[in-house]
């Protein structure tokens, strides 16, 4: 008997019981997957984090803090580390509210994303009217002072936020900072690196999710240029504020992968999706799957905890309702993070053998393949016989939409596939359109 395991790191234990009958051996195997039950723990299974924006003035709200401490392992200050908050008067720095968030997080083992060192928006009044060299120096001093103050405590800094224009140009946004010279962004990154060499340094923006949009291309070219010239950039943040007018693009995975291919990490930094019910849940699932499909997508942060905490509360864009209950979107995110394994207590996929089969025994082992928002690949390795017949049983409403290295037939329900060799060896594969059901198929092997 041979058992599958998803991966070494997941260490999913599968127990199986073999029952032999006179004519054929039948294997029945059941187990409970140790699927994680919180966002942070489920993301951690693949080495990723799951964070939220936090507002300092909510740290006295027991429901809020209860969810924060239970679910998340990364925190971003929603407003408290912005330029107007940390340097309200020029040269006078103020870290009280930011520290409350940082201390809350760090004392509980959560990490912190710093947001944001340089931005055209939420500038203190004194800075808004500055220009030229004075503004450039004030900005660089701000970056240096704040990044130095938090040195060693920040996982990733949004060094520069939202520097590109919307629309079809792919150009920089006009701002007082931009008018100090096109090199203001790289100057900010160099100052941040000098101040905190241990923090990952990110460029962060919105409307950069669709690969075919000019703004996405503009940011991509800047990151490509920075990497080519040795400007210290480690990551790109995708804010990911979605709604019906700006839905999750179908090429999201492509966007994340193309940026990662430049040699930077990618992070989803301010995720919220307006909507409700299963539509919203599916969109969240698609975002999580896009991140999981990209090795260098290192974590996801949602922009608030309950809908009532959101900066866009009327769009109910978050994972918990205003009373703190988990929404459908929460469940879809959790299950996507658990990579399609079932919650604890449900049946796991099994492999089967027929040790008493006169034709010889065989073993079929399942391995997960690539996953997309609507489908996933599975691969089966057969050992023990070359004249194998593997039965692949899907869970409704799943459907196989492609196969390779096998000749396959289906029963009338369309959920039981019988796979035989087609001359291409003993490893075959198939694509399952999951229709919302991410369960693995179960397998049995006989010879024939
Ligand atoms: C928002 C906050 O959520 C609000 O509380 C504040 O009034 C405005 O800023 N892009 C960003 C975030 O980078 O800092 C913004 O946060 C949302 C858009």
Image (spheres, rainbow, N blue to C red):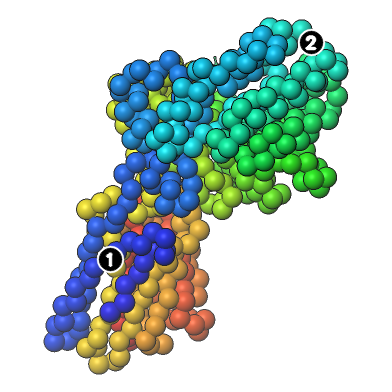
Q: Quadrant of the C terminus?
A: bottom left
Can you tell me whether the CB of the residue at mark 1 lies under 8 Å from the nearest atom of ligand 1?
Answer: no
> In the picture shown, does residue 286 fall above or below 121?
below
Nearer the observer, 203 or 193:
193
Numbered marks: total: 2
Residue 142: quadrant of the picture: top right
Give the crowd class for mark 2: few <14, some 14-19, many >=20 residues within 10 Å: some
Quadrant where the image shows the N terminus: bottom left
Name the element at disc 2: loop
Could you say which disc has been placed on residue 130 in the image? 2
> Residue 391's spot in the image, x, y percent?
32, 72
The residue at the point 74 percent across, 22 percent down is 141
Mark 1 highlights which residue?
14
Observer able to see residue 249: no
Query: Which of the two marks, 1 or 2, is nearer to us in this view?
Result: 2
Report whether the residue tagged 2 is closer than 8 Å to ligand 1.
Answer: no
* Visible residue check, residue 196: yes
For image coordinates 67% across by 41% down, the residue present is 197
417 over 74 or under it: above or below: below
Q: Secondary structure at mark 1?
A: loop
């Amino acid at each position: 008997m041979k058992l599958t395991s998803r991966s070494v790191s997941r260490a999913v234990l599968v127990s199986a019981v073999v029952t032999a009958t006179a004519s054929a051996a039948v294997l029945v195997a059941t187990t409970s997957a140790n699927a994680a039950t919180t966002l942070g723990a489920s993301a951690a299974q693949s080495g990723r984090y799951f964070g939220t924006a936090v507002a300092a003035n909510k740290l006295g709200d027991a429901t809020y803090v209860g969810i924060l401490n239970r679910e998340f392992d990364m925190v971003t200050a929603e407003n408290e580390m912005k330029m107007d908050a940390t340097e309200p008067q020029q040269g006078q720095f103020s870290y009280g509210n930011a520290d409350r968030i940082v201390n809350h997080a760090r004392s509980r083992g959560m990490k912190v994303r710093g947001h944001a060192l340089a931005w055209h928006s939420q500038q203190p009044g004194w800075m808004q009217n500055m220009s030229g060299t004075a503004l450039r120096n004030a900005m660089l001093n701000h970056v240096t002072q704040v990044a130095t103050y938090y040195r060693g405590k920040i996982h990733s800094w949004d060094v520069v936020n939202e520097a590109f224009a919307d629309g079809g140009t792919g150009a920089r946004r006009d701002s007082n900072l931009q008018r100090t010279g096109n090199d203001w962004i790289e100057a900010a990154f160099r100052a941040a690196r000098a101040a905190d060499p241990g923090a990952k340094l990110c460029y962060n923006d919105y409307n950069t999710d669709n690969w075919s949009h000019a703004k996405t291309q503009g940011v991509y070219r800047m990151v490509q240029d920075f990497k080519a010239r040795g400007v210290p950039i480690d990551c790109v943040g995708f804010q990911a504020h979605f709604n019906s007018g700006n839905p999750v693009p179908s090429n999201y995975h492509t966007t994340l992968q193309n940026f990662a291919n430049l040699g930077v990490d990618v992070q989803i930094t301010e995720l919220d999706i307006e909507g409700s019910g299963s539509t919203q849940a599916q969109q969240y699932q698609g975002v999580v799957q896009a991140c999981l499909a990209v090795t260098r997508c290192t974590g996801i942060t949602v922009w608030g905890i309950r809908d009532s905490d959101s900066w866009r509360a009327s769009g109910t864009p978050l994972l918990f309702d205003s009373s703190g209950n988990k929404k459908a979107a929460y469940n879809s995110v959790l299950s996507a993070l658990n990579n399609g394994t079932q919650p604890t207590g449900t049946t796991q996929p099994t492999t089967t053998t027929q040790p008493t089969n006169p034709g010889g025994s065989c073993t079929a082992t399942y391995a997960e393949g690539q996953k997309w928002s609507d489908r996933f690949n599975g691969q089966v390795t057969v050992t023990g016989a070359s004249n194998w017949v593997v039965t692949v049983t899907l869970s409704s409403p799943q459907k196989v939409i492609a196969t390779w290295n096998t000749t396959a037939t289906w029963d009338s329900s369309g959920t039981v596939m019988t796979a035989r060799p087609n001359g291409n060896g003993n490893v075959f594969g198939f694509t399952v359109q999951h229709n919302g059901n991410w369960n693995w198929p179960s397998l049995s092997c006989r010879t024939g």
